[in-house]
């Protein structure tokens, strides 16, 4: 016996039982009332006719049948309205458990509002589950793609050295170390983004000078940017915040690396200012900026503008997602806009009193 059949029988049986109890209560209640009147007010009752005859019992029994049948029919219809969407929910849940994440439950016309809301919430949950599964699949494919390239290069260099094709010299070792460092950075970035998404990215919060942190980050990358044809101009407002200095500088390095890879050589403006209870650190480059169709996805992991048709300029596609993860972990955010000259402007907002 299925649970659906059990519940249907329970609803029908309960309705029929309640109807029979109602009929019996009405009939025997009338007899009890007549008996009370006969006992206490005998003058009000015809003592010869108040007791039911055999024909009365037959009539009550016969007339009760259509009432019970109607109650059964109504209860069957009620059970159908209740059980049909519940059965659809159960079937969809079973399909999802078996791996079909596209399964959805349907509602019938005339379903109760509460059940319709339940079905809607279930379908919303199923859609979220399918979206998460799709994201995990895409994430795994992207990770495999990013790791495969440096591993393939390393394997080729080592295999070539073993076969005598490449000399085992300092250049080969430097190239191998470069690929290993790239893999190490990729693993670190993956770990940071994953921890941030799960709300478990630990920060070492301390009192920090924004201008000092920005200048230290700029000094590290200034030679590389200078070789690429960039000049840096800073306009920093003296502000102190509570933040993780290492993570803050990591976010700034990622933004400046993004400039070096994607912007045209020219002037890079770095500024800081206070906006309410936030400090805003802005990096503006000469352009060309992000493609319009890429802006909404720019801070997602493994998203690169070159995937939309531009020339591949390197990088794992994790840089901006790392910036967002660090900003979010501080209780802040990162935004993108275009400058009046058509360049890119990335602004990192951090609370002045971070937790």
Image (cartoon, grey):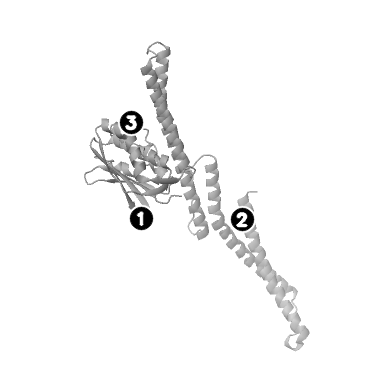
In the depicted view, which residue is nearer to us: 15 or 289?
A: 289
Q: Eyeballing the image, is 118 above or below 263? A: below
Q: Which of the two discs, 2 and 3, labels the residue nearer the N terminus? A: 2
Horizontal side of 51 relative to 84 (left or right) equals right
- Can you tell which of label 1 and label 2 is closer to the viewer? 1
In the depicted view, which residue is nearer to us: 87 or 124?
A: 124
Give coordinates of residue 139: x percent, y percent: 43, 36
Give coordinates of residue 319: x percent, y percent: 37, 37
Tell me the residue at 65%/61% (across/down): 14
Residue extending furthest toward the top = 164
> Can you identify the residue that label 1 sits on?
276
Disc marking residue 314: 3
Residue extending furthest toward the bottom = 43
Disc marking residue 8: 2
Tell me the residue at 54%/46% (across/down): 93
- Can you tell which of label 3 and label 1 is closer to the viewer? 1
Helix or strand or loop: what does disc 3 sit on?
loop
Q: Distance of mark 3 from mark 1, alpha carbons?
A: 37 Å
Helix or strand or loop: what does disc 2 sit on?
helix
Q: Which of the two discs, 1 and 2, labels the residue nearer the N terminus? A: 2
In the depicted view, which residue is nearer to us: 24 or 101?
A: 101
């Amino acid at each position: 016996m299925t649970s659906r059949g059990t519940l249907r029988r329970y609803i029908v049986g309960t309705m029929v039982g309640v109807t029979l109890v109602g009929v019996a209560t009405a009939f025997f209640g009338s007899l009890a009332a007549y008996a009370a009147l006969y006992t206490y007010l005998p003058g009000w009752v015809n003592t010869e006719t108040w007791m039911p005859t055999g024909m009365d019992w037959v009539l009550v029994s016969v007339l009760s049948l259509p009432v019970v049948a109607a109650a059964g029919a109504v209860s069957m219809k009620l059970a159908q309205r209740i059980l049909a969407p519940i059965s659809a929910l159960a079937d969809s849940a079973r399909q999802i458990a078996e791996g079909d994440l596209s399964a959805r439950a349907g509602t019938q016309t005339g379903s109760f509002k509460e059940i319709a809301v339940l079905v809607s919430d279930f379908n919303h949950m199923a859609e979220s589950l399918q979206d998460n599964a799709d994201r995990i699949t895409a994430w795994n494919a992207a990770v495999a793609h990013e790791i495969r390239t440096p591993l393939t290069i390393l394997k080729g260099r080592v295999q070539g050295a073993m076969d005598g094709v490449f000399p085992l010299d300092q250049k080969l070792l430097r190239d191998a170390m470069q690929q290993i460092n790239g893999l190490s950075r990729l693993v670190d970035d993956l770990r940071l983004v994953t921890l941030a998404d799960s709300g478990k990215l630990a920060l070492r919060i301390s009192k920090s000078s924004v201008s000092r942190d920005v200048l230290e980050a700029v000094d590290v990358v200034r030679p590389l940017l200078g070789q690429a044809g960039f000049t840096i101009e800073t306009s920093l407002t003296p502000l102190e915040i509570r933040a993780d200095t290492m993570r803050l500088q990591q976010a700034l390095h990622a933004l400046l690396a993004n400039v070096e890879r994607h912007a045209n050589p020219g002037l890079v403006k770095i500024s800081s200012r206070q906006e309410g209870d936030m400090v805003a650190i802005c990096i503006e480059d000469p352009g060309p900026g992000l493609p319009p169709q890429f802006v909404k996805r720019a801070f997602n992991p493994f998203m690169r503008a070159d995937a939309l048709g531009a020339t591949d300029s390197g990088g794992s596609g994790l840089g901006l997602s790392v910036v967002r993860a660090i900003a979010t972990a501080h209780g802040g955010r990162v935004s993108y806009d275009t400058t009046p000259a058509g360049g890119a402007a990335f602004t990192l907002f951090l609370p002045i009193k971070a937790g």
